[in-house]
Amino acid sequence: MKQGELAKVTVFSRKVEGQPTHLWDAADPDNAQPAYQGLLLSNTSELLLPSGQGSAFSSGSYLGEVCVPAIPVGARAFIPVGPSSALRGNLSEVLKSSRMLESGDTMLDEQHLQGRVTLSNVSPREISVIVRRVVSAKSVASHDFTVRALTMPGESFHALQATITIPARSTKTLKYTLERILPAVR
């Protein structure tokens, strides 16, 4: 800062409780590592939790340094700590039907896909998992997932999202139907 300039500096130090959890994110089916371990932080205070660096601990063990985004009052955020060694997953989607629609001068392809996410907990402890599959805003989904709005830079997306518990050394499968409308390829 130069002499005579003013700046506002936020100084914030607070212990925030987080729930150990895992995230399986199928945003990119080609992603070789869609499973992460981390913390689910809830802002139960009456103030916006500002973004910044933090140290993550679980049962007294140091997990690592984390980048924490700003968390509004009453909101939750998943903070990744690193790849998950406890969670294995697989996504499969099958095109069940497709039909061409005409919308003015544009041809659209209405598709119905059936999807399945199979997750295995290979650890000796029960784990909590947030399962997320990002889709375009023109998609509609049903079954085991709920649709959540996500904010992405420059675009509007939705996510199919479910939170599940997987017992130790067990497997769970979530099924969904996805209806999407895409520009037709000619």
Image (cartoon, rainbow, N blue to C red):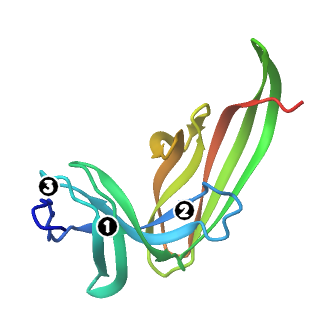
Instruction: Check the image and name the residue furthest to the left.
Output: 4
State the mark number for residue 19: 1
As helix, strand or loop, the secondary structure at mark 1 comes to strand
Q: Is residue 77 left or right of residue 183?
A: left
What type is the residue that disc 1 sits on? Gln
The image quadrant of residue 41 is bottom left
The residue wearing badge 2 is 24
Q: Is residue 5 left or right of residue 52?
A: left
Task: Give how far apart the Cα atoms at labels 1 and 2 are.
Answer: 16 Å
Is residue 20 at least partly visible in the picture? no
Q: Residue at (15%, 60%) from the top-left corner?
A: 7
Q: Looking at the picture, does residue 53 appear above or below residue 101?
A: below
As helix, strand or loop, the secondary structure at mark 3 comes to loop
The residue wearing badge 3 is 45
Neighbor class of circle 2 (other Cα within 10 Å; few <14, some 14-19, many 20+) is many
Q: Earlier in the sequence, mark 3 or mark 1?
A: 1
